[in-house]
Image (cartoon, rainbow, N blue to C red):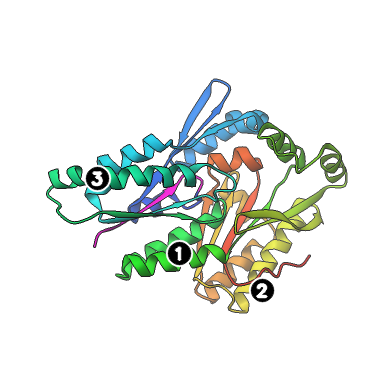
Amino acid sequence: MRIGLVVDSACDLPLEYLQRNEVTVLPITVRIGDAVLADHRDEQATLEFLNAHVAERGHEAETMPFTVQQIHDLFLQRLVIDYDYVFCMTITKTRSPIFDNATQASFAILNDYRPVRAAAGHDTPFALRVVDTQNLFAAQGVTAVEAVRLRAAGEGAPKIRARLENLALHTHGYLVPPDLYYIRNRGRTKGDRSVGLLSAALGTALDIKPVLHCNRGETGPVAKIKGFNPAVQKLFEHVVQRIGHGDLMTPTLCLSYGGELDAMRALPGYDALREACQVHNIELFESVMSLTGMVNVGKGALVVGFAAEGQKFSA
């Protein structure tokens, strides 16, 4: 059985990895004023757009994921011919309509694929599964990497489906945002008032940075630490501890950063984290944050993703 894998461009994995493993990307288009870029995980294009637009006006951005019709057309034009079963892994449905769009499109795809496959010489059925990763950005990458690994190991679609859906329940995404005002303004643009003016002002004045945690589609603070670098260091130390205890459910750790990766690698605690990954045979994936991610959480934000049971972060 030929198994295909699809992610949306908010999934923070290196483009080279996605291309090498033939993972299809559903692009998300970002518009800031008259500037428009379809995010295909091209890091250089993302950085150029970031430097030109996001830092000043990112909170005003409009993000436009693939529509139901665009997803339908992509499958009918290529994926139902190239594969027999496709897993489409999306950003959490609590933060984006991509999961719902893909689910709605799947009904039409399963109704329309037969003549397309027949014309290509395939007389076998086609199936697809839309998987809500229940997480964001780098943490989405954990599910995708596991799907690649299972496919390469020759596992069948039922086992892959069960594994991915279970893994989504135990995937943790941690975010350290550098600018609470940005988060507040972006939230107001999207109708989310979870960070108020007073909280942003106090946090900025005192240089307090939250460590935000996402699991099962729910996001909230697990710590508030004075200073961005100390907050990042505390997060890295937490991950090193979990790696050292053998807690990770997959040998995968994903990092993404809203800027040049050299700046991320200079953050305190990074070297110890990288060493822990090497010692314990954890594959470390590093990528520039998607443009979608950056317009939502701001330039210079850091996201860490891994899978483990329980949430044990303590400041």
Name the amino acid, label 2. Answer: Gln
Q: Residues within 10 Å of mark 1 (few under 14, many from 20)?
A: many
Q: Which of the marked residues, 3 or 1, is nearer the chain's N terminus?
A: 3
Residue at 62% in and 64% down: 271
Q: Whole-percent x and y of residue 114?
A: 20, 46
Q: Is residue 294 above or below residue 165?
A: above
Whether residue 283 can be seen here? no
Q: CA distance from mark 3 to mark 1?
A: 25 Å
Q: Is residue 1 above or below residue 61?
A: below
Q: Are marks 3 and 1 in contact (CB under 8 Å)?
A: no
Q: Which of the marked residues, 2 or 1, is nearer the chain's N terminus?
A: 1
Q: Which of the marked residues, 2 or 3, is nearer the chain's N terminus?
A: 3
Q: Is residue 8 magenta?
A: yes
Residue at the spot of label 2: 241
Q: Whole-percent x and y of residue 223?
A: 78, 59
Nearest the viewer among 261 and 24 is 24
Q: Which residues are magenta?
A: 1-10
